[in-house]
């Protein structure tokens, strides 16, 4: 597969069919014609990549309402053998689906993915205040289970509308999300390979463990970005699991590793925290182009390097050109 993920090799994704994750995967050029393997969990999808069973896996990483998908953040943080090569943002809408003949008042147990129930909590509390929630591996899995032979494990499922259309489920309520315009961000993850080329509208993801806990430790990390004009679009802390209070930071930064300001920031991070992990540079889904001041552009770094070298050579060099 090419670095931008645009070939017909095989893919894994958080299944079953008709999940939002599959919708995200189908936006990748060639994926619709490729072999697609549904996995029962994020970890299972990524393990298929590590085992060489598929070339890449599409998994959710962030939701505009609920925030980071911890299963993905934790899984990709611990492996040096995984790289993010693409991101996809998908609008999410939810319906309450049930077997034909079911009424809203018949619903006492609702199944869906944890991020979906979080996005529909207000509606559920208002219209189904006595109903209990049962977590499912995915929204689609919760709906598909209602189509099998009874007894059924739950009365209704919160799913994408396409699940009801495909399987003939009754729609008890439409568009029940608490926030209009909600989106979920997905990432395509592969084994290490050449980076997607720099586009000028890129994102870099890294994981930075705290080497030790002391006043200003987080400030030292953030200072590596601010001093070089690198904007952060996401930063989340996650426990390492080693002991209480031991955390790593999962960070998305604007820019590409080939940008001098980004490479210099990562070099600074590595000096502070040698266990810093690089998880990939890839095109942004929104095509946004960061505003970079002149003194943080690649040319400024090149001029500064040339000036330093001239000092060591005993030369007099002045660079006053406006850029």
Image (cartoon, rainbow, N blue to C red):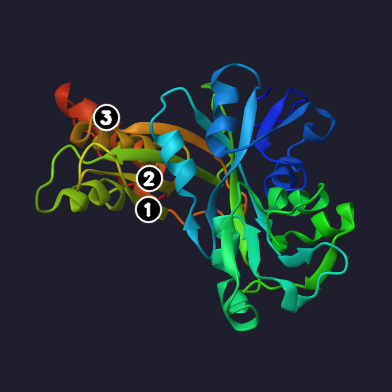
Q: Is residue 231 visible?
A: no
Categorize mark 2 by other alpha carbons within 10 Å: few (<14), some (14-19), many (20+). many
Query: Residue under circle 1?
Result: 235
Mark closest to the chain's N terminus, 2 or 1: 1
Categorize mark 1 by other alpha carbons within 10 Å: few (<14), some (14-19), many (20+). some
Mark closest to the chain's N terminus, 1 or 3: 1
Q: CA distance from mark 1 to mark 3?
A: 17 Å
Query: Residue under circle 2?
Result: 250
Nearest to the observer: residue 149 or residue 233: 149
Q: Quadrant of residue 303?
A: top left
Residue 116 drawn at (x, y percent): 60, 61
Residue 224 drawn at (x, y percent): 26, 45
Q: Secondary structure at mark 2?
A: strand
| Cβ atoms under marks 2 and 1 closer than 8 Å | yes
Query: Residue under circle 3?
Result: 275
Q: Residue at x 73, y 24 (%)?
A: 10
Residue found at the very far front of the displayed protein: 151
């Amino acid at each position: 597969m090419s670095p931008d993920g645009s070939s017909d090799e095989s893919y894994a994704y958080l299944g079953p069919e008709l999940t939002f994750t599959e919708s995200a995967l189908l936006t990748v050029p060639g994926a619709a014609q490729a072999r697609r393997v549904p996995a029962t969990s994020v970890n299972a999808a990524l393990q298929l990549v590590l085992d060489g069973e598929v070339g890449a896996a599409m998994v959710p990483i962030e939701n505009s309402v609920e925030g980071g998908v911890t299963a993905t953040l934790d899984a990709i943080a611990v492996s040096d053998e995984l790289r993010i090569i693409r991101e996809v943002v998908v609008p999410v809408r939810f319906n309450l689906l049930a077997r034909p003949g079911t009424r809203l008042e018949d619903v006492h147990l609702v199944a869906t993915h944890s991020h979906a129930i979080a996005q529909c909590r207000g509606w559920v509390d208002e219209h189904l205040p006595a109903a209990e929630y049962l977590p499912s591996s995915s929204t689609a899995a919760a709906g598909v289970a209602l189509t099998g032979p009874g007894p059924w494990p739950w009365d209704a499922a919160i799913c994408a509308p396409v699940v009801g259309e495909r399987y003939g489920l009754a729609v008890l309520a439409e568009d029940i999300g608490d926030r209009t315009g909600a989106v979920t961000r997905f990432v395509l993850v592969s084994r290490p390979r050449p980076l997607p080329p720099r586009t000028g509208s890129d994102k870099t993801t890294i994981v930075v463990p705290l080497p030790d806990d002391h006043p200003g430790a987080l400030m030292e990390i953030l200072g590596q970005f601010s001093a070089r004009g690198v904007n952060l679009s996401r930063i989340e802390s996650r426990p390492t699991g080693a002991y209480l209070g031991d955390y790593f930071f999962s960070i998305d930064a604007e820019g590409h590793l080939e940008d001098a300001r980004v490479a210099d920031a990562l070099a600074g991070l590595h000096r502070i925290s040698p266990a810093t992990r690089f998880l990939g540079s890839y095109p942004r889904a929104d095509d946004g182009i960061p505003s970079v001041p002149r003194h943080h552009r690649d040319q400024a770094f090149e001029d500064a390097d040339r000036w330093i070298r001239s000092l060591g050579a005993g030369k007099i060099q002045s660079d006053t050109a406006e850029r």
